[in-house]
């Protein structure tokens, strides 16, 4: 049987942390995987040098994950087509806004027996429907795509601090292969079939984190935040089961569900910026510029997209937490409504 050749598509903070795991694990299973792992790196300048040259010389990504060494078998490649040439396993771990452009370039260049897994947290929510990134990749490339999501802060994973993650995969054989590719003593993997639930949790939890941050900014304390987290989990479940009937209850108790929700509502940029919004009253775009160097906050954008999806269906009242976050951020509703208006 031919060995699997792995290519990582993406090399940011999370992509670099994943590269360390994958590079180590392919060497643990020499009968299953080729030893070299190629990683597509968007070429950038780093202190007067090409970033790929620095990564391949130092075995470290000093721009996005400084201080963490990669295995020597991980090779940075600046050309996407070259990086993916001959690959039988693609690991998508890049910002969601680049997915379509990457898939356009790879279209008709990937064999149909290739397998992929998406580590991208987010959804594309439009008034006419909800698109999972695993399904979009599958549609554009004509291959099977699994999903990985969990309570996985990249720096902590890279520092080998224990955590869990969830892989959603329809194929038992592919699920077993992905388990071997990602599971370590400190990064414990559980494989389930509900890839839809895995991806939904990874996106919707960001709205709840904004609600938790608003509560923190008002100084409401742990009891209030716990209520917001519980109500948010219920709305995540309801959204999934209303619009994706196949989503299973048990998925929400995996790392991709309640664990990631707890982590995101305790720390992370969505909670942090929402707290500052409640304290200062500054517009979100100003806080994004000051606190995130201009990067966009995922939770507020997802709240707007969910509202635009629910409103034409006259269903906003059925998701009071999601809707309240939207109204506070975009319609000027009082921040205090985060506790007044979140119950049906």
Image: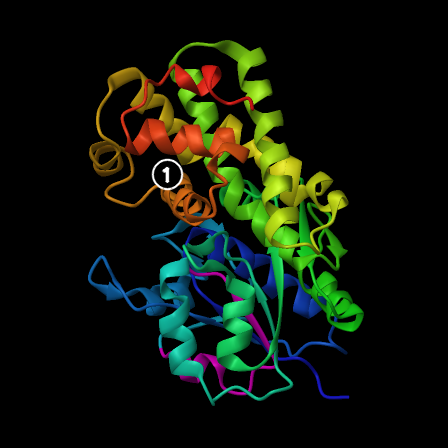
- Seen at 55% across and 65% down, the residue is 134
Does residue 29 lie above or below 244 as drawn? below
Q: Position of residue 100 (x, y in %)?
A: 39, 71
Q: Work out whether 230 lies above or below 244.
A: above
Q: Position of residue 40 (x, y in %)?
A: 43, 71
- Residue 28 painted magenta: no
Say whether residue 335 is left or right of residue 207.
Answer: left
> Is residue 149 in sight in this rendering?
no
Question: 213 or 27: nearer the eye?
Answer: 213
Identify the residue at image location x=49%, y=86%: 85
Q: Is residue 180 left or right of residue 274?
A: right
Taking the image as shown, residue 181 lies to the left or right of residue 335, namely right
Q: Residue at point 57% right, 76% down?
A: 36
Q: How is the image coloured?
A: rainbow
Q: Position of residue 325 (x, y in %)?
A: 41, 30
Q: Residue at x 68, y 51 (%)?
A: 166
Residue 22 found in image quarter = bottom right
- Screen quadrant of the C terminus: top right
- In this orientation, does residue 176 appear? yes
Which residue is tagged 1? 300
Tally of numbered tags = 1
């Amino acid at each position: 049987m031919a060995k699997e050749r792995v290519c990582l598509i993406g090399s940011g903070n999370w992509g670099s942390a994943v590269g360390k795991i994958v590079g180590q694990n392919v060497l643990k299973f020499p009968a299953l995987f080729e030893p070299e792992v190629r990683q597509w790196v968007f070429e950038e300048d780093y202190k007067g040098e090409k970033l790929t040259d620095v990564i391949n010389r130092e075995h470290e990504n000093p721009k996005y994950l400084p201080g963490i060494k990669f295995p020597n078998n991980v090779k940075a490649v600046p050309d996407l087509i070259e990086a993916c040439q001959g690959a039988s396993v693609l690991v998508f771990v890049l910002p969601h806004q680049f997915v379509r452009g990457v898939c356009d370039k790879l279209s008709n260049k990937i064999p149909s027996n290739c397998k992929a897994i998406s580590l991208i947290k987010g959804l594309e929510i439009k008034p006419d429907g909800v698109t999972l990134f695993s399904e979009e990749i599958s549609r554009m490339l004509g291959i099977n795509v699994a999903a990985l999501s969990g309570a996985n802060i990249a720096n902590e994973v890279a520092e080998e601090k224990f955590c869990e993650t969830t892989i959603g995969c329809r194929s038992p054989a592919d699920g077993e292969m992905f388990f071997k590719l990602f599971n370590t003593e400190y990064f414990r993997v559980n494989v389930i079939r509900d890839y839809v639930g895995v991806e939904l949790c990874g996106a919707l939890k960001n709205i709840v984190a904004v609600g938790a941050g608003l509560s923190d900014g008002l100084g409401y304390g742990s009891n209030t935040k716990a209520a917001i987290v519980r109500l948010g989990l219920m709305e995540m479940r309801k959204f999934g089961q209303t619009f994706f009937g196949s989503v299973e209850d048990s998925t929400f108790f995996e790392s991709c569900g309640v664990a990631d929700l707890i982590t995101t509502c305790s720390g992370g940029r969505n909670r942090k910026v929402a707290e500052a919004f409640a304290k200062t009253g500054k517009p979100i775009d100003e806080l994004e510029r000051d606190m995130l160097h201009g990067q966009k906050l995922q939770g507020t954008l997802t709240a707007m997209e969910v509202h635009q999806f629910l409103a034409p269906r006259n269903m906003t009242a059925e998701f009071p937490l999601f809707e309240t976050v939207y109204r506070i951020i975009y319609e000027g509703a009082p921040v205090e409504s985060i506790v007044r208006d979140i119950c049906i």
